[in-house]
Amino acid sequence: MAMEIEAAIPPPEVRFTKICKNYAFRILQIENISHPIRKRAPDTFPPGNSFGIPNLNLQKYLDWNHQPNAADKKKKFPSQLYAVLNSICKELPSLNIEKMSQPKAPWTPNPEKLIDFATEKIDKKSAAEKHRKFVNPLLKNPGNIIMYTDGSKNQERNKNAAASICIFYKDEKIEKGWKLSNKIESNDAEIFAIKMAYQEIKKQTNQRIRHAWIFTDSLLSVQQLRSNTTSQNSQNHEEIIKMAEKLKVQRNIQLHIHWVKGHSKIQGNECANKIAKRFANSERKKPISNHISLTHIKRGIKNSVLKQWSEKWQKCKEKGKHYCQFETQPGWKPIKIQTTKKVWSTYMQLKLGHGYFKSYLQRLPNYEPRCSRNCSAI
């Protein structure tokens, strides 16, 4: 088990749990009620509109969202599908899950044709100066509106997320913020902030605006909007693309989404950051939504599986003297090893189970061992 931790390979029991949870998560994203799996899923499993087993006898069977206890030893799930869906029951504190984007049609516009994306990576020292030289001429032109967006999540207290925008237009500065649910991730807040920035652009009645510049320090958000192919894209992604198309077609406004280095003393970015943190830490303000995001559920699945792996490792008595001297903990990434290419190649062969050793070669049909019959398999 110690080598499994070093190679980031979960034991079979943990791997099976992870597969079940990921499968249940995929079913969660199926909205087509005519899908064969959806037809057999319970009607209470989000987002609903399923058939399941009609008139399920709860005296005899367990429902998908039921946590078995000592009194339920004789009860079983009516099907294996119900048992798989039950694996993510704890990761769904409520059934109010965010709406997912619809499957994209072939004629769906390419985001890069509607929006100018830029993700130039520069060092923190020169980021502020370079950005200042780029933005100052834009501020002098009344045809440009400059917006900085940010998302934040309080990881210590209420774990609420928040989004904010800081708008610069002519000589005016506008600050806005929103407190969001504690069941979403910081990247969801970043995407929400970009969507609200587009809403503010739509409110602008000045017909002279020809360019809307949005600067964000979330590289992941820019990459997701640019690709627009992620299976976990929320409805916010879809709304941003639709609004971008309307603004370009109806009002001839060119949209720009540029990534900027965070915490680089860029005035607009620092302003948006402070607003987002203030709203996330506020106890008085109420969240404008209570839904659960898909990324939050996905993170919960990874954490629960990792917790199961850690508990299994703590209970293991045969850890080996070498590993007992370290505080070794399971993780999803292998431990970085500085070694020669030959040793690393051997390590990867052992990890994958494919290499020049007898336990693998004897699977080949024409393999003839060079040693005698008494030679044990390596």
Image (tube, rainbow, N blue to C red):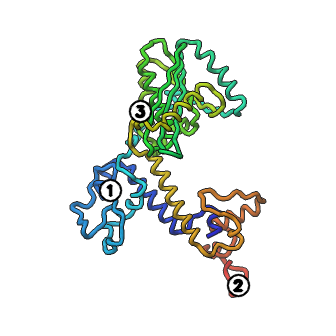
Residue at image mark 1: 36
Residue count near mark 1 (Cα–Cα under 10 Å), binned few <14, some 14–19, many ≥20: few
Q: Nearer the viewer, residue 336 or 328?
A: 328
Q: Earlier in the sequence, mark 1 or mark 2?
A: 1
Residue at image mark 2: 375
Secondary structure under badge 2? loop
Residue count near mark 3 (Cα–Cα under 10 Å), binned few <14, some 14–19, many ≥20: some
| Residue 355 position in % (x across, y down) | 67, 68
- The outermost residue toward the left is 55
Q: Decide if residue 306 is on the left or right side of residue 337.
A: left
Residue at image mark 3: 239
Identified by mark 2, the residue type is: Cys
Residue count near mark 2 (Cα–Cα under 10 Å), binned few <14, some 14–19, many ≥20: few
Q: Earlier in the sequence, mark 3 or mark 1?
A: 1
In this figure, what is the number of numbered marks?
A: 3
Identified by mark 1, the residue type is: Pro
> What is the distance, in whole Å, between disc 1 and disc 2 at their CAs?
52 Å
